[in-house]
Amino acid sequence: MITSTTLRRASAAAVALTALALAGCSSDADPEASTTPTGGTSPTPTAESAALDTVTDGTLTIATGEPAYEPWVLNDDPESGEGFEAAVAYAVAAELGYSPEDVEWVRTTFDAAIAPGAKDWDLNLQQFSITEERRNAVDFSSPYYTTTQAIVTVEGNDAAEATSAAELEGSAVGVAVGTTSYTVAAEAFGEDNLQVFNSVGDVVGALNAGQIDAFVTDLPGAFYSAAVEVEGGVILGQFAGSEGGDEFGFVLPKDSPNTEAVTAAVDALREDGTLAALELQWLSDAVDVPVIE
């Protein structure tokens, strides 16, 4: 269980996650090998890296938020390669043939990154959901993460002691209508056992008012709600499946000549299990959000 105390360090990050909230497997891969940006054996530059048209020759310039927050980037230090998105960025860079020393980090706001116009970076990642509207202004790689669904409750209540969906039988579980969260909650608890609200905000209000014992929302939204919106909020756990969730992709400048290569790199990391291993390491184990059975 991740508590509000732990989450408080990421409270400002949760602000950035608000828009996302309102808008993924076992592997043989070694996450440490992919998340250590310095030391070890540097990748040998490949034909892919030589072919990339980057802002600075020989350097892959990657942007993230200012500041960047946990669990996506630990300690606002993407150069460390610690945190899910920092680790994914270095894994993609390596797949493209760039050693850690050839990666340069810069900062941008969320809105500026997805606005039309020239960019001073090659890639940008800060939990950008891939949408058709945004494709009018920027390119996206294939998704490196699909949001899962999670259960938020309040520390100290009976629901907070549950370790499985079955143990929540008899608890009042809320969810917003018409959302992916509703689909997952209905499958887990049965439609007749849910309390359905018009919006996520209404669900949060119901938990704070004691009308429900817990609610289901996507994991980025759960980080925000537990840290900021719910007094004593805790994330009980996350569901294993991510079907129907928002997809996060790298943003590239519109019509970038590198989009195809970056997408190929992301696809390769998904297929060999690296992305799944990094997700488990940084979005489950590191922040203690267990998978709900």
Image (tube, helix red, strand yellow):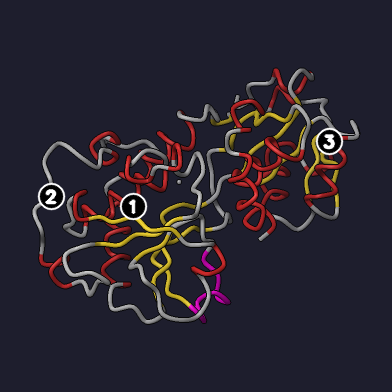
Residues at circles 2 and 3 in contact by the CB criterion of under 8 Å: no
Neighbor class of circle 3 (other Cα within 10 Å; few <14, some 14-19, many 20+) is many
Say which amino acid is labelled 1: Ala
**Earlier sequence position, callout 1 versus callout 3:** 1
Q: CA distance from mark 2 to mark 3?
A: 49 Å
Name the one closer to the observer, 230 or 166: 230
Using the numbered discs, state the Cα–Cα distance from disc 1 to disc 3 in whole angstroms: 36 Å
Which x, y percent locates residue 188? 68, 38
In the rendered image, which quarter contains the N terminus?
top right
Residue drawn at 59 percent across, 27 percent down? 6
- Examine the rendered structure and indicate whether residue 117 appears above or below residue 267: below
Label annotation for residue 43: 2
Please report the bounds of the magenta region as a residue range: 130-137
- Badge 3 marks a residue whose secondary structure is helix
Where is residue 185? Give x, y as percent.
71, 42
Q: Which mark is residue 207?
A: 3
Q: Disc 2 vs disc 3: which is toward the camera?
A: 2
First of labels 1, 2 by sequence position: 2
